[in-house]
């Protein structure tokens, strides 16, 4: 019920009450005319008026309560709408949050994929770089070996020339000596020839054995921590595989042939490689090259000098001293 309707209702009811009061008053006046005084009339009218006021107050309160109930209903409806709107907003926010989370997960997966690809490419580049470095080192080693062999060949040629010169000088000296002996023999008498023949010992005519000495040492490997246990066990306590051993040689012997004779005589292993420059000794008695670093390996010297040539290209003579040495750097 609206406020205007309440007022109209109150007005109608007030009018009815007034009419009733008037009728009551008239009846009271008519009835009281018989013997009641003026004071009694006034008291009755006051009570009636009080009753009417109470009725009006009751109706007014009823109207006010009815209006408040309508307002409460409107307020409740507004609250429901706000709650529904808030719920929709919350659902919208939740959907947006889920979508954002999916996007973040997708971006993280894509980033991880890109990182994996980058790592793979970096690993490939590193492997290619190492391979290139390895090839470069091999080429450098080959070039260095070729230069050494070339230098050794030059020194060998020089040595051969010197040997030829010595042989020529020796032949000339031998010719002069022979010529002098012939002259002396012609002057001697038969008795001298007889004494000479008697003094000649057949054993002295036997040619002397040609001997050279060979040593194989690896003292530098003693106490090296880089060696594997297998190689450490092969290193002799004194550092010598053989030391100053005498080897009988014949004509045309080389450093390599003397080494093989020593192997056959003293029973150690040899690891020999054939190259375009001749024989290359990669290991002796199980101790291989690069066992203690990339540049470690076997070298040899003849009469205290290191020839820069293959051991199969260096000739040896009686009295030569050959030493094979394990070195840590070429």
Image (spheres, grey):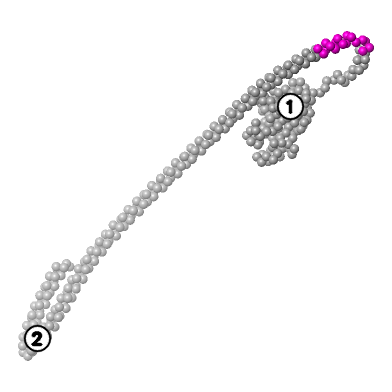
In magenta segment, residue 65: no
**Tag 1 or tag 2, which sits nearer the N-term?**
2
Give the SS element for disc 2.
Answer: helix
Dominant secondary structure, magenta: helix
* Residue at 72%, 28% in the rendered image: 304
Q: Nearer the viewer, residue 282 or 12?
A: 282
Q: Quadrant of the C terminus?
A: top right
Tell me if mark 1 has few (under 14), some (14-19) or many (20+) residues whose alpha carbon lies within 10 angstroms of its own.
Answer: few
* Residue at 85%, 12% in the rendered image: 181
From the viewer's perspective, is residue 27 above or below residue 311?
below
Would residue 14 appear left or right of 117 to someone viewing this image?
left
Name the quadrant containing residue 222: top right
* Residue at 29%, 60% in the rendered image: 83
* Range of magenta residues: 176-192
How many tags in the picture?
Answer: 2
From the viewer's perspective, is residue 4 above or below residue 193?
below
Label of residue 41 in the image: 2
Label of residue 303 in the image: 1
Give the SS element for disc 1.
Answer: loop
């Amino acid at each position: 019920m609206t406020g205007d309707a309440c007022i109209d209702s109150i007005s109608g009811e007030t009018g009815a009450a007034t009419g009733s009061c008037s009728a009551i008053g008239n009846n009271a006046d008519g009835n009281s005319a018989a013997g009641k005084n003026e004071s009694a009339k006034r008291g009755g009218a006051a009570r009636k008026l009080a009753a009417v006021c109470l009725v009006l107050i009751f109706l007014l309160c009823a109207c006010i309560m009815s209006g408040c109930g309508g307002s409460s209903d409107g307020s409740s409806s507004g609250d429901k709408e706000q709650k529904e709107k808030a719920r929709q907003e919350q659902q919208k926010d939740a959907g947006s949050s889920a979508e954002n989370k999916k996007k973040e997960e997708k971006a993280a997966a894509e980033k991880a994929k890109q990182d994996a690809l980058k790592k793979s490419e970096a690993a490939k580049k590193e492997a290619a770089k190492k391979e290139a470095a390895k090839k470069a080192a091999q080429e450098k080693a080959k070039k260095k070996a070729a230069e050494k062999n070339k230098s050794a060949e030059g020194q060998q040629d020089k040595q051969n020339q010197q040997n030829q010169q010595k042989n020529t000088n020796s032949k000339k000296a031998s010719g002069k000596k022979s010529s002098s002996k012939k002259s002396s023999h012609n002057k001697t008498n038969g008795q001298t020839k007889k004494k000479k023949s008697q003094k000649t010992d057949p054993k002295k005519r036997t040619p002397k054995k040609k001997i050279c000495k060979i040593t194989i040492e690896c003292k530098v490997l003693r106490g090296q921590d880089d060696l594997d246990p297998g190689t450490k066990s092969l290193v002799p306590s004194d550092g010598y595989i053989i030391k100053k051993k005498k080897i009988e040689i014949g004509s045309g012997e080389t450093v390599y042939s003397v080494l093989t004779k020593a192997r056959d005589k003293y029973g150690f292993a040899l690891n020999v490689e054939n190259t375009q420059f001749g024989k290359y000794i990669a290991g002796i008695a199980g101790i291989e090259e690069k066992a203690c670093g990339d540049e470690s390996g076997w070298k040899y010297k003849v009469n205290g000098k290191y020839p820069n040539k293959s051991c199969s290209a260096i000739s040896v003579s009686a009295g030569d001293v050959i030493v094979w040495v394990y070195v840590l750097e070429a």
